[in-house]
Image (cartoon, rainbow, N blue to C red):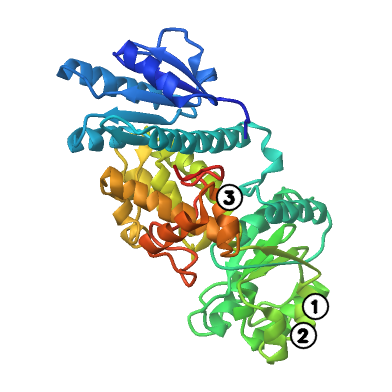
Amino acid sequence: MSNGPIHIWFCSPDPAFADVIARTLGPGYEVQPSHEFAVESGTELELWWDVVLLDLRQVASEAEEHAGLGLLDELCQFDPPPPVIAMLADEDHSLTRRVMEAGAFDTINALPIVVELRLIIRRAHKFRQAEKELHRLHSMESASWRLHELLGISEDMQQVFALARRIAPCDISVLITGETGTGKELLARAIHRSSSRAAGPFVAFSCANLPETLVEDELFGHEKGAFTGAMMMRRGRFEAADQGTLFLDEIGDLPLGLQSKLLRVAQERSFERLGSNTARAVNIRLLCATHQKLGEMVAQGKFREDLYYRLNVVQLHLPPLRERREEIPFLAHHFLGRFAQQFGKKVKRFSRLALHVLEEHNWPGNVRELENVVQRAVVMAEGTTIEVWHLPLGMRRGFERLQSVHSYEEEVRDFKRRLILRTLRECSWRKAEAARTLGVARGYLHRLINQLQIHPTEAETGPGLVDNPLDLPHNSRIM
C-alpha cells in the first residue's frame, strides 16, 4: 500500500464546487479537477489517479446525464478500472441504480459530509490498491503463482507448488489429499506434465461409488468371453496408461477386495486381465487422491496398511478455500476474465459488496464452487460490473439489507457500531484502551455502547457487522 496522498480526479461541471471539495478534504488528498464529462485524448491521468469523483448532482439535461454515464462507462473500460464515486442529487434512486449497474464503486446523495466523503474515498482507495495488486499478479511471470492450470498465491499453495515441482521429475508414487473441489486432479496433471512422462498418456479414473466388479473391469480390462456379455477383449486403465501416468481419484473408496490387486500392481508393475492367466507388464507412474483420512481408515481396518504406505511415498495436501481466503479475490478475478472472454461479455470487475459476499462465504465446494458461481455471475451480468444480485440467492442472504439505500443517519449509526465493535475486539474489550484508540472520552464511549446496543457476547461476524478492511480503515476515528 502507498503511504502518499490519495490522488483524486474530480469531474464536475461546477469549478467552484471542485475547489471547495479540494480544500475540504485537506492534507492527504490531492485533487485534479476537470469541468467536462470526458477523458482528454492521449491523457495519462489513468497513471496518476486512485479514485474518481463524478459529480452528477446538477445535470441540467438528459444530454448531460448521458455524457456523465458515458464517462463512467469509458472509465470502466480501463484495465484495471478506477473506482468511481458518483455524487447524486438527494433521493434520486433511479439514477443511483443506473450508475451502480454501470460500474460505479459507490454513490453519495446530496451534499456530502466531510467525514462520510473521506471514509468512502479511503475505502475506494483500498479497493483500488487491491485491484492493482491483483492486476500486477496476473501481468507478472506466472511461474510464481501457478502450476500449469492450478492457481494459488497463498503461502500454503506456494509450498505445495514448490514440493510438486521438486518431486515431479522423480518417478515415485504420490498421494494427494484435500476436500472435494480443491483441485486434486489439476495437481496430478501438473505433476505429470512436469515429469519425464509428459509425452505419455495421463489416464484418470475415479473409484467413488462404483461396484467392485465394474471397478475391476475398468482398471484391469477383460478377455473375450471372460463373463456373460464380454463379446470382445477390452483394455483397462492400467494398459491405457502404459508409459505414462495413472491417476486414481477417491482411492479411499476402493473396495477391500481390489486393494490387494492394486498393491501387487504397485509393487510388481504387472497384472492380469479378467479371464486371463497371462501377466502383463506396464510402465506407469501411480498418483492417487482422496478426500478421506486414510490413516484413520487403516486403523479402522477399512484400508490396507501395506497399500497405504506403498501409495503414500510423498503426500501433498491442498487446503480448503476457507483456509486461504486471501486467494478468493485473486481466483474470482481470474475466473471473471476467463469467462468474460469465453462468453463475449464486457464485465471487468466485482462491486465492493459482491466481492465482500464472496470473501465471507464458507465455500463448502471450494475452488470448483467459486468457479461455478463466477461463471453464473458473468452470464447474468449485463454491464461491466458483477453486482451482489448476480450471485446465488443463498450466498447473498443476510447481505440484502446492505443493498438498500439508507438514510445518512442510518449509515453513520451502522459505521459507528462496526467501528466501535471492531476496536473493542482488538482491545480485548478494555474500554479505556478502546476510547484512547478511537480518540474519544471514556464516558462518551460508554454512552455510545449503550445507545448502539453493543454487547461483549456479540458474534464475531454477522450482516452489517463483518470486519471488512474495505469498509473500516484502521485509522478511522469517531467525529
Tell me what residue is drawn at x 29 percent, y 38 percent.
382
Q: What is the C-alpha distance between the residues marked 3 and 2?
A: 57 Å
Q: What is the C-alpha distance between the residues marked 2 and 1?
A: 6 Å
Residue 325, placed above or below residue 111:
below
Three-letter code for the amino acid on which mark 2 is drawn? Glu
Find disc 3 in the rendering and name its residue. Answer: 437
Answer left or right for 378 relative to 435: left
Q: Name the spot of residue 25 as percent of width and height, x first.
A: 45, 26
Three-letter code for the amino acid on which mark 3 is drawn? Thr
Three-letter code for the amino acid on which mark 1 is drawn? Tyr
Q: Name the spot of residue 313 as percent of width and height, x first.
A: 81, 69
| Quarter of the image that includes the N terminus | top right
Tell me the number on the disc at residue 305.
2
Q: Earlier in the sequence, mark 1 or mark 3?
A: 1
Residue 314, placed above or below residue 134:
below
Find disc 1 in the rendering and name its residue. Answer: 309
As drawn, which residue projects farthest toward the top?
Answer: 41
Say which quarter of the image contains residue 58.
top left
Crowding around mark 3 (Cα neighbors within 10 Å: few <14, some 14 to 19, many 20+) is some
Answer left or right for 97 relative to 161: left
Tell me what residue is drawn at x 67 percent, y 58 percent.
188
Answer left or right for 103 relative to 265: left
Say which quarter of the image contains residue 273.
bottom right
Crowding around mark 1 (Cα neighbors within 10 Å: few <14, some 14 to 19, many 20+) is few
Q: How many marks?
A: 3
Tell me what residue is drawn at x 49 percent, y 27 percent.
79
Q: Nearer the viewer, mark 1 or mark 3?
A: 3
Tell me what residue is drawn at x 58 percent, y 51 percent.
436
